[in-house]
């Protein structure tokens, strides 16, 4: 099995992965917008340009965006790697797609729950659901390459 | 040379990579457990569910877990990329395995040293040892593709 | 199209990607040096080794390095994934190279602007320029795999 765009599971994986990366870029853009709106900058040089040094400060809404972004880095980047290797194992396209869609939906819910501060445990639940396909792919990979330790 | 699960170096790389990602997931789970045990939440909505808004606070043990996790993101993610490209260079499987095992062991020691606050410079030493195979792979790759700048 | 080191776009991508990862490693090393020079450590065990517990503190220069590093993780890691998949789409090598070089130069300027606190909006501009090739690759990928949702 090789990686190319004739591999159906890989195409599906690529589709959801790229959507999630665009979602992450959107959170980054949002963080910048909230910094401007709330006048809360991380760097004195930015604060100077937007009203003065006193605006070099933290803001609860900015920190919330940054936590959402960091959690994405903790979860989505590993998914990108696990998904590529998982596709090399020639999984059933339909089972593979269940993994990718579950992860994708869970991470979308996670971001919405984070940014809108939805009632707990919505966000933690979305996080946990998103980790299930990751663990599943990790285990399937380990079983296949365990002889190469 | 292509990437598939007949490439011995790639299988070995995959094995250690997935173990390290599972280790990262374990640090994330631990962070959540420490948050619950120490009642120190990053979000008001979580604090409200677990005792009240006053538990929306930072905690030294939680911060330690988060630093360990962040350092993993700074080191393990680059390894995932460098390892894949390195395997495309058809390295000797035994030399490749030395790279992967060194990195794997160094990062395991790093995490233990971080979480148990072992005496300095245990953690920094583990960090440095882990970076050696990364630099070695990076240089080998650069030498092979330097003509394509 | 498959990934190997005969694929010209992929070789060019690999070259710039590895240079950017080495740049990130350099920022990490710099952070450690600034911690030592400013005596500002994140962990009590490090502070104890370098003068005493009172040096377990934050420092503006250290925080600046850490923000530069975090921004790299937010931008360069997605580029590594997008670039690999983009190369599988058999792009024109010259157009591909424009993407990689733009991203590479923008991220080098971004790091310099961050570390030397250059006048705003140098850094934000470099950030924005760097995101353009990422969005371009993301869109090209999405168009090619949109049927696999």
Image (cartoon, coloured by chain):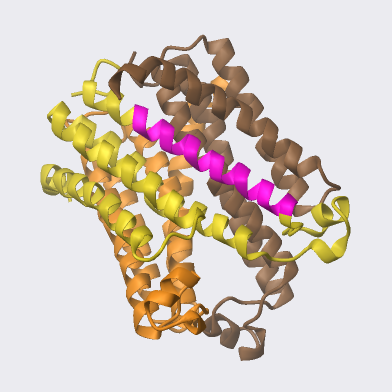
Chain colours: A orange, B brown, C yellow
Give coordinates of residue A129: x percent, y percent. Answer: 43, 61
- Residue placed most toward the observer, A90 or C23: C23
Residue A89 in view: no
Magenta stretch contains residue B134: no
A122 lies left or right of B65: left
Give coordinates of residue C95: x percent, y percent. Answer: 14, 34
**Residue sitting at x 30%, y 31%:** C13
- Residue placed most toward the observer, A58 or B113: A58
Q: Which of the 4 image quadrants contains residue C39?
A: bottom right
**Residue sitting at x 20%, y 36%:** C98
A134 above or below C53?
above
C81 above or below B68?
above
Magenta stretch contains residue C24: yes
Q: Which of the 4 image quadrants contains residue B48?
A: bottom right
Give coordinates of residue A139: x percent, y percent. Answer: 50, 39
- Residue placed most toward the observer, A25 or C54: C54
**Residue sitting at x 83%, y 46%:** B120
Give coordinates of residue B119: x percent, y percent. Answer: 86, 47
> Bounds of the magenta span?
C15-37
For the C terminus of chain A, which image quadrant? top right
């Amino acid at each position: 099995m090789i990686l190319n765009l004739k591999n159906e599971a890989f195409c599906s994986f690529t589709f959801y992965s790229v959507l999630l990366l665009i979602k992450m870029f959107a959170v980054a853009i949002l963080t910048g917008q909230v910094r401007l709106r709330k006048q809360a900058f991380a760097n004195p040089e930015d604060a100077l340009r937007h009203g003065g040094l006193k605006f070099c400060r933290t803001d609860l809404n900015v920190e919330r965006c940054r936590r959402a972004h960091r959690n994405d880095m903790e979860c989505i980047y590993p998914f990108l790697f696990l998904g590529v290797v998982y596709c090399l194992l020639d999984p059933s396209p339909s089972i593979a797609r269940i993994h990718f869609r579950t992860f994708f939906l869970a991470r979308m819910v996670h971001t919405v729950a984070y940014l809108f501060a939805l009632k707990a445990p919505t966000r933690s639940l979305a996080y946990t659901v998103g980790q299930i396909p990751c663990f599943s792919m990790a285990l399937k990979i380990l079983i296949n390459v365990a002889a190469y330790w």
